[in-house]
Amino acid sequence: MFDATPILEALALLVAAVITAVVIPYIKSKTTSTQQQEINSWVKVAVLAAEQIFNGSGRGAEKKAYVLNFLAEHGIKLDEARVDALIEAAVFEMKNGIIKSN
């Protein structure tokens, strides 16, 4: 049986790199530094909370819905592509130990 895990991990790293190199700088160009720091902080808080609330794999849709609702409750209104990019960047940072989940 073929194990696709290494391929999926490599693909996830590639997507995260593209998000980091292209999408995040675009978002930053549309907001002030202070606004961006606040948005990034709220996204990270929401992602970490979703990871704590919805344990286990295969619950990505629930986690994303939680994050989107959390951000909306805190007045953060971005288009879906921007929010997706910020979520992916936060998840990448969490999984690679850049931000801690505990």
Image (cartoon, grey):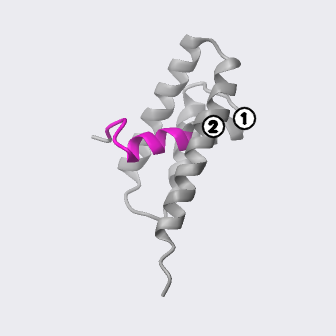
Task: State yes or no: discs 2 and 1 in contact (Cβ < 8 Å).
Answer: yes
**Which numbered disc covers residue 94?**
none
Query: What's the residue type where badge 2 is placed?
Result: Val
In percent of the image, x 35 and y 48: which residue is there? 52
In percent of the image, x 58 and y 35: which residue is there? 20
Q: Which residues are magenta?
A: 87-100
Vertically, is 27 above or below 32?
below
Residue 46 rendering spot, x and y as whole percentages: 46, 37
Res. 82 visible in picture = yes
Badge 2 local density, few (<14 within 10 Å), some, or many (20+)? Answer: many
Q: Give the residue pinned by disc 2.
A: 83
**Secondary structure of residue under mark 2:** helix
What kind of secondary structure does the magenta stretch mostly adopt? helix
In percent of the image, x 52 and y 58: which residue is there? 10
* Residue 36, quarter of the rendered image: top right
**Along the horizontal axis of the image, is 59 left or right of 101?**
right
Query: What's the residue type where badge 1 is placed?
Result: Asp
How many numbered marks, from 0 up? 2
Residue 87 rendering spot, x and y as whole percentages: 55, 41
* Residue 88, quarter of the rendered image: top right
Residue 28 rendering spot, x and y as whole percentages: 64, 21
**Along the horizontal axis of the image, is 22 left or right of 5?**
right
**Secondary structure of residue under mark 1:** loop
Q: Give the residue pinned by disc 1.
A: 79
Q: Is residue 5 magenta?
A: no
Residue 17 rendering spot, x and y as whole percentages: 57, 42
Q: Nearer the viewer, residue 75 or 22?
A: 22
In percent of the image, x 60 and y 32: which residue is there? 72
